[in-house]
Amino acid sequence: MKTLFFTGYPGYLAENLLKQVLLDEKEIEHVYLLVLPDQQHSAAEKVAYAVKQSELSEEAFTIITGDITKENLDLHPEINEKLITSVTHVFHLAAIYDLGADKELAFHVNINGTEKVNKWAASLKNLERYIYFSTAYVSGTREGRIYEQELVKGQTFRNHYEHSKYEAEILVENLKPYIPTTIIRPGVVRGHSITGETTKFDGIYFMLNLLERLSSLPTIPYFSKGTAEGNFVPQDYVLKAASFLSFSPVGEKKTYHLTDPNPYTMKELQQMLSEAYLGKKPKFTIPSQTAKMLLSIPALRKWLKVEKEAMDYFTVHSSYDVSLAASDLAGSGIICPDFKDTIRTMVEFYRKYKHDHTRHIYIP
């Protein structure tokens, strides 16, 4: 029987990965969820919902308060002793994901926090797998083909999020010779490929925010030449693949790109979304530098609901190789759907919930 430990709950990825794991794995004895003190109520509500959808009883879930940036995750000594002898799988998802995060916060949580989780995971007596959620964008500003086995290549970074996740992944990579580790590198995660459901309108949804604001214009522009690939992957693909690779023996001591194997360029994505949402094809191009300059005006980017850092992903020509992920997922039935086949439900969900402020991220 397996005993799971999650960081990052009740965050978007941790919440949904837990649901997926509960669907996939039938030999789970207990689930421990590490939450910050002010997240206890939200976590309890989401656990109650998870219980209804799973075969486990409410007693099989324990919410624990703690802090990944502190020694032993700030766990009570008695609880820690119990976890050290019982936990078999650690899922580390707690992180600062905001592209606009300041350096001090991103480095403290993403690097220092991961160092503390690593140290704690290494102390577990019955650990079968340590699963770390990184990002494909640890490649930073590298261009060309990026392979799953690559990490340290002298790259620079577009923001503190990328840099901090890169430094954190190095720490996790160093554990591979000693403990069974799986590193997951998703592309930019978007909503469910079938239902369109998402809890956050960021990433690719910045394009929809922009289209919504510019909808009254007679013509719509492209933002930059858009020749770079846009790697946006549906949450259900990422969650199913991560769940499978986290428990399958094939996933041990591996790093995987869970990215789109057949991505479109940013220009193609802009055109598809504009036609699906507004029925208009963009007619002219605003240079990326001009677009970024405009988004440097706080009032304008707040009105548009677009982070200025998002423009950096229009200009770096990176292509993420998925050979290892494709090989190890072969036969599982888990494949990444084509973006164009999921646009309708994505746009419908956005149109229905675009006025829900809780789904929009804060734009400083």
Image: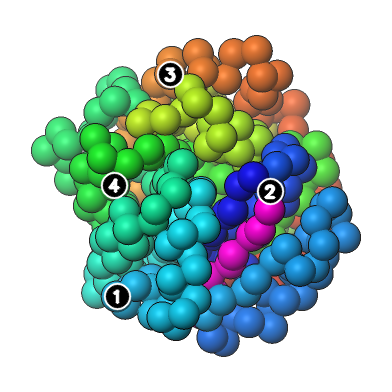
Q: Are marks 1 and 3 in contact (CB under 8 Å)?
A: no
Tell me the residue that label 3 is attached to.
324
Q: CA distance from mark 4 to mark 2?
A: 25 Å
Q: Which residues are magenta?
A: 29-36
> What's the amino acid at mark 2?
Ile
- The residue shown at (54%, 86%) is 37
Q: Nearer the viewer, mark 4 or mark 3?
A: 4
State whether residue 331 is above or below residue 71: above
Q: Alpha-carbon neighbours of circle 1 within 10 Å: few (<14), some, or many (≥20)?
A: some
First in sequence: mark 4 vs mark 2: 2
First in sequence: mark 4 vs mark 3: 4
Tell me the residue that label 2 is attached to.
28
Q: Are marks 4 and 3 in contact (CB under 8 Å)?
A: no
Image coordinates of residue 296 in percent, x first then y, are: 36, 67
- The residue shown at (39%, 53%) is 125
State whether residue 218 is above or below residue 265: below
First in sequence: mark 1 vs mark 4: 1
State whether residue 170 is above or below residue 326: below
Left or right: residue 206 versus residue 208 is left
Tell me the residue that label 1 is attached to.
71
- The residue shown at (46%, 41%) is 128
Tell me the residue that label 4 is attached to.
172
- Dot 1: what SS? helix
Judged from this view, the residue extending furthest toward the right is 52
Q: Quadrant of residue 279?
A: top right
Judged from this view, the residue extending furthest toward the bottom is 38
First in sequence: mark 3 vs mark 2: 2
Q: How many marks?
A: 4
Q: CA distance from mark 3 to mark 2?
A: 27 Å
